[in-house]
Every structure is written in structure tokens, then in C-alpha cells.
Amino acid sequence: MMNDNKVTIIGGGLAGVEAANQLAKRGIKVTLYEMKPVKFSPAHKSEKLAELVCSNSLKAERVGSAAGLLKEEMRRFGSVCLEAADKAKVPAGGALAVDRDIFSSLITESVLNNENITVLREEVTKIPEGTVIIAAGPLVSDKLAEEIGKFLGENFLSFYDAAAPIVTADSIDMENAFTQSRYDRGGEADYINCPMNKEEYEAFYEEIINAESAELHSFDKKKDVYEGCMPIEVLASRGKDTMRYGPLKPVGLNNPKTGHRPWANLQLRKENAEGTMYNLVGFQTNLKFPEQKRVFSMFPALKNAEFVRYGVMHRNTFINSPLLLNNDFSLKKDSRIYFAGQISGVEGYMESAASGILAGYNVAQKIIGKEKLVLPDITMMGALTKYISDETVKNFQPMGAAFGIIPPLEEKIRDKKERYEALAKRSLEYFDTLDLR
């Protein structure tokens, strides 16, 4: 049993607030450091905790999906992020999307009002003494990143990530757009679709592959682009039709104005509850701002678009977790130090939050003298944990929720939907055996 029952958490993102919540509700005092507003990363703009940067989507809600199963598992732990997401929800078909400001406000209020959590608004530049959860995020400050790198040696990695633009709703030309969710899942008006015919698409393709990109921030010139958040111009450079099989895929859609499926289609998703702003789904980019305006306005529906925010590219940082982390998110080198969030090698908002839940839960278990919780890989949270702590993983890259990392069922089920639902059922039946109080 540990003598010190105080825990320091670095980072007030999704992982940090989830870790703090798990500890606080077990009566453990937490000091949570958040450097905003004293210092902002290149991508963050809000002073609030749990700020969403790249997108307002938390992915699919359906439990029979990988993302949906992950969220259902997190609910079993009393996820503070999902509690806020349910209250800040905006229409998004089969996805859980939120009003970013309401989402962050709810979480910030919850954390600040928790008597067991003390929030300090200052930058941490050294790894503190005592029990520490480093949840500084993929945009960890340069000074702390340098300290972590020195402490871990050469097993410190980084890559680049990119965010999509946002446009105002009233600047979208609805004469050249239509509302429909893909395959008619969810509400009809959840997405605004911006179709292109073949000629329009080919002209767009020529412009985007020749458009000028912005210079990367000076803090790091290494251009390792992460596959999971590919800038649209990088994707386009890989072939003429790559966008049509990615963010511009037209499948599951029918333009009522033509009676046909578009040649290519960009979907816009609500960015806030009022529906006054829309996100260009899948259009993460590092193009210069004037180039974004020029090229993206080639969509007939966006010819007069007013951009509230242009896309930006920023550094993401993560550690070589399979070599460095135990299966409770503690460091092999120093078990008083835990990592959580995208810096630990999970990819995605909910995945980051889930890692914070497990790190916080296991620190609490250690403090109160109980066994650590290692979920089996038949669960999504367990499979993610196993992936980032598996020493046999080579050429490590961050991983998001996916059924491919969960072991198959004993019974073979040919239908994919039925198979995924069975995998989800197996996981949740295991959770029904746990006492997570």
C-alpha cells in the first residue's frame, strides 16, 4: 500500500479529467495542472478543460460498432466525458457529436466544483515527485516534452496531425446542397451534403494537389504525417480517386435534385447545438488559409462559404508504449509515473478518455491497496491496453478502437454486423461481472 495518497495529473484534456474523476470519487486528493490560459499550444484556443480540437465528433454511438462499444464500456466506469457529451449532443446521424463549447463548459464546471480536485493553471516543465499521471496530450509543451524525452531516452516519438475547417451555416448554398445521412441513418438533416459531378471533381483535384501548404510551426520540422488524421491534400496526392474512396465518398447518398448518386460528395456536420456552424468532415488540412478559401470554395455549395476557422496542422507526440508501459499504464522504468491519453499511444478522443479512466482507476487501486485492473482483450478497453503495452508490436503507431484488435469469437459468424454485435455482447457480459465502484 502506498503511503502518499495525493496524485498529480499533468494535463486537463479528456484523459486528465477522466483520471482525476476516477481518483476523486474514491476520496483521493488530486492536483490537476493545466497550462491554459497561461500558455496555449498551437492548436488550442479555449481556456476550458477537455477542449476538442480536430473535430466535434466522438464517432459512432451504435454498441455494435467499435467506437460505440468503447463508449458503452466507459459508461460502466461513470465517464465524466460521456456524461457531458450526452448533455451537449448535436444531431450527427449515427455518430455522437457535441457542441464543443457546451461540452467543455460542463466538464470544466464539474472538475472545478469537485472538492477532491485542485486545478492549478500553470505550465509543468519538470516531472513532479510522487505519483504522477502524465496526460499532457499530443500537444505537450516543448519544455515538458524535452524532459520526458530525456527521461525515456530514445523511445520518444512524434508525428503530425491536422484539423478541418469550419464554415457558417448561412453561407452554404443550399441550392447546390442537400440534407441526408449516409444510408439514411439518423436524422435527415444531420448532414449537409455538397455534391460534385465528374468535371467539377477533376478540376478540384488538379487545384488541391497544386495548392500551397502552410509552413509548419518552428518547434518541430519533422514531417511524419499520421495516417489516422491525413491532411486532405496529402491524401489527394496519392491518386486521382483516393478522395472519392475517403472523405468524398458518395456511397449511401442520393441527390434528390438529380435523382442520382453524386460523383463525389463532401459532408458537413453540425459544429454547435444551434446549427450555425458546420465542420468539413474529413477535411483536415495544412493548406495556407487563402488556398483553403480558394480551393474548398470550388464545391458549388461552398462557393460563397464564410470560414469561421481554417484548418491547421500541429505536432502530436506519443511515446513508444510497447517498450515503455505496463498494462496498467505505469512506466516499466518508474512505476510511480503513469501515462494516459494520446501521448500513451491511443488514437482518438474517446480512446484518450478511456485510457485516462484506466490510469486513474489503477492509481486509485494502488493507493487503497487493491489489485490493479487489467481488462481482458475481449473488451475494447482491454484490447487497446494490450496493444499499447505489447512488446511484440513492431513499428508502433497509435491505435483507435477497432474490432480487429479483439480476438475472434469461437463461433464463426459470416455477417459482419451480427459478428460485431456478438463481440460487443461478449464484452459487456464480462463487464456485468465487475464491481467498478
Image (spheres, rainbow, N blue to C red):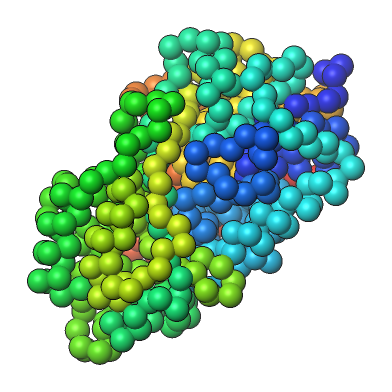
Residue 396 placement (x, y as % from top left): 38, 27
**Percent from the top left, x then y, of residue 125?**
64, 20
Q: With respect to residue 103, does 189 lie above or below?
A: below
Q: In this image, 326 relative to 361: left or right?
A: left
Quarter of the picture holding the N terminus = top right
Identify the residue shown where x is 56% and y is 11%.
151
Q: Is residue 37 visible?
A: yes
- How many numbered circles does the render carry? 0
Which percent across, then down, holds residue 153? 48, 10
Instruction: Identify the image quadrant of residue 102.
Output: bottom right
| In the depicted structure, whether residue 77 falls above or below residue 390 | below
**Viewport quadrant of the C terminus:** top right
Q: Where, by quadrant of the figure, is residue 371 drawn?
A: top right
Residue name at image x 45 percent, y 75 percent: 169
Which quarter of the figure has residue 30?
Answer: top right
Q: Image point 30% across, 76% down: which residue?
A: 301
